[in-house]
Image (tube, rainbow, N blue to C red):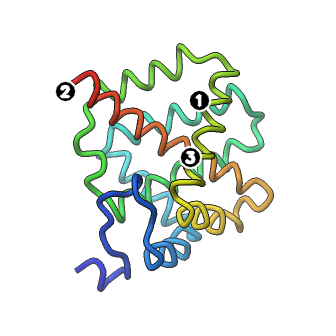
Amino acid sequence: MSELITGLHAQPLFPSEDLSDTNACMLELMLANASFVESTHLDVEKISWMYRVGHAVVIAGSRRIYDDAPIQAINTGASMFETISAVVASEATAGVSNFSVNSVAAIIAYTKEEAQLLDYTLEAVEQFRTDLPRATGVVLEASRRKHHALRHYALLGAALERQFSIDALEYGETFEG
């Protein structure tokens, strides 16, 4: 039914699997609307501990290695990733425990030196570009109007949010069961 209303279809394997061409086209338009991204990401963070904590860790970690200028673009990218995940893969965070989320957040926040954090960031961006080329294009294009020169930082924010969610899922599978 939602496909008739929004033009989007479910992609339960996102973010392990890239966006379809149809979803990428629709999301590029939807994410260009900053108020849509802001309201959707706030709603998602109300129901997903992983995204609420992940977003905070992305911003806190970014502040350790970047000046203030790109932080807003990084924030936008993290919000865009949450929004994409919510509209195409709403069950993506269902199996992630608060313990896993908190553990990964603590590992990133307290055990990584700045150089390790920078490596983690660069690897996350490269993996995002490789695994999700259509999602990469969506984030870059949708953030062009608001963060033209800094839109690659929006991609960085989306990539870090994705990597955090992958790490939390893997941590849970490894240590919880």
Residue 162 lies left or right of residue 128; in this view the side is left
Q: Residue at x 22, y 41 (%)?
A: 95
Report the front residue among 24 and 170. 170
Which label's residue is closer to the chain start, 3 or 2?
3
Task: Name the residue carrying label 3.
Answer: 127
Residue at 55% across, 41% down = 160
Dot 2: what SS?
loop
Q: Position of residue 79 (x, y in %)?
A: 51, 52
Mark 1 vs mark 2, CA separation in Å: 29 Å
Given contact means CB atoms under 8 Å apart, are the residues at marks 3 and 2 in contact?
no
The Cα–Cα distance between marks 3 and 1, rounded to whole angstroms, is 21 Å
Note whether 158 is above or below 170 in the view shown.
Answer: below
| Residue at position x 64%, y 52% in the image | 154
Question: On screen, 58 above or below 9?
Answer: above
In the image, farthest residue toward the left: 177
| Residue lying farthest to the right in this orientation | 149
Q: Position of residue 69 (x, y in %)?
A: 77, 43
The local crowd at label 2, few if under 14, some if 14 to 19, many if 20 or more residues have their Cα within 10 Å, is few
Residue at image mark 2: 177
**Residue at which label 1 appears:** 60
